[in-house]
Amino acid sequence: MKKMKLTSIMLLVFTVLFSVSCGNNDDPAPAPPVGETLDLGDGSSAFEIKTNTTLKWPNTYNLKGFVYVPSGITLTIEPGVIIKGDKSSKGTLIVERGGKIMAQGSNERPIIFTSSQTPGNRKPGDWGGIIILGSAPNNMGEQTIEGGVRSKHGGSNANDNSGVLSYVRVEFAGIEYSIDNEINGITFGSVGSATKVDHIQVSYSGDDSFEWFGGTVNAKYLVALRGWDDDFDTDNGFSGKIQFALSLRDPQIGDKSASNSFESDNNADASEATPFTGCVFANVSLFGPVSNPASYVDRAGEKGSNVNARFQSGLHLRRNTQLSIFNSVIAAYPIGLIIENDKSSRTQTWADEGKLNVANCVIAGCVKKFQDKQYWTDNTQFSPTDNGTFADGYFSRSSGGNRSFTTLAELKLGSNPLNLTALDVFPKADSPLTSGYSWTDAKVSSGFDKVNYIGAFSPSETATNNWTTGWCNFDPQNTVY
């Protein structure tokens, strides 16, 4: 009897403890911890981090002025940390050659670089951005990076290691100090292949979202949202491999020069300096601003257009670039593809010789699919007499495996694939993006995941379950940080 009574008491205690520990399923989740707000930098143009430093969660940091991570120093950023770029001092983080950034976020707790301005008042170019510099090769030798900073990049170590940038968001960065002298959302200068870069979203950049000046760094899972100038800009012999990338453009946000999704040069002078810009992209989805090509108003009739007239093309390949792009989709741009021999370059020759590659790609819903020259310069329109004869012939070659469609609807995506705040770009089972891919070219035979679809997303992914889920934010303007 006593034994039974003791057993009953123990069972009662266990039941109470279990109820307390589990709680009511309707109870609100515990509030996240609140940390301190601390300054990183002093607002000057030459603040150096002197010792290995860790930015700790759940603290928030105000990035003030130019903050340098010099050679021999490592800056570690814990998952979930928020860094707010100061507007008045143009807060910018510069990781110099020999320095390292260890920014390993997570799907649940991405590391967030954003504007210090309040929700509703944030704009592209509120702060500088992130600049990472290394000692990998470029085709211009040792050079000072753009953006008004002191730092140089370039060397001979293709395997150079600048650290980790993973599960990171960069919002409202990008400043133009002068023509062709800008800080982008993220700038990579001669960054080496031992650097880890994946799961990066750049939103509302005041210049390019991503720009690479030489280097060998590889990357996966990149998002460019509502950028001002180009989404993915490659120069100075960049030779990395990029897979799974998405861009979405705001129809009303465009640069004073032509805004492209891809802009690729060997270098600004279009010289044949080596190494050539020979980067390789695969599984990229580029969605431009043109929802209705039939009603699009071009540069000549800019007045009244519902799309910023500065938009140009999905792919602008020029100045001796030897870039390659495979298994990708270019949609809803004024022009799909430009392959240009500007500045007496031989870009079209490289295409004919297979050194530049656009293969197993799809163009859809563009006002004009092809052109051979820049759309406009200094208010002079080139499009009326430029039918893109070379680009058309090259893209349509039988060996290329490329296809084009008149409308975006023919891709059989969601009902609103140009939605900027809720992704709706996932191919249905009968979408043409589920076929026509190829991994036989030597440039994509290694270093890439051999997936069975074109573009950044598979038909099995959905709005609530895809590689952007959790860590991305498609409405940073209204987020309270």
Image (cartoon, helix red, strand yellow):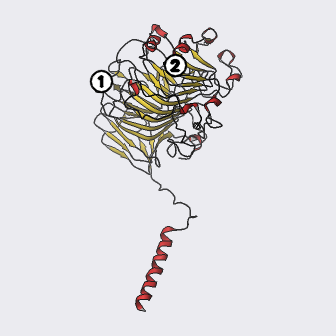
Q: Nearer the viewer, mark 2 or mark 1?
A: 2
The residue drawn where x is 58% and y is 16% is 370
Does 103 sit left or right of 333 as displayed?
left
- 304 or 117: nearer the viewer: 304
Label 2 or label 1, whichever comes before in sequence order: 1
Measured from the top left, where is residue 73 in percent x and y? Answer: 30, 38
In the depicted structure, whether residue 33 falls above or below residue 447: below
In the depicted structure, whether residue 280 falls above or below residue 198: above
Q: Are marks 2 and 1 in contact (CB under 8 Å)?
A: no
Measured from the top left, where is residue 4 in percent x and y? Answer: 43, 88
Residue 383: numbered disc? none
Residue 92 appearing in the image: no
Q: Amino acid at mark 2?
A: His
Does 85 sit left or right of 69 as displayed?
right
Measured from the top left, where is residue 366 in percent x and y? Answer: 62, 23
Mark 2: which secondary structure? Answer: strand
The residue drawn where x is 36% and y is 14% is 273
Residue 316: numbered disc? 2
On the image, numbered disc 1 is attached to which residue? 155
- 107 or 406: nearer the viewer: 406
In the depicted structure, whether residue 30 falls above or below residue 270: below
Q: Amino acid at mark 1?
A: Gly
Does 300 sit left or right of 323 as displayed?
right
Labels in figure, total: 2
Mark 1: which secondary structure? Answer: loop
Residue 79 appearing in the image: yes
Q: Quadrant of the N terminus?
A: bottom left
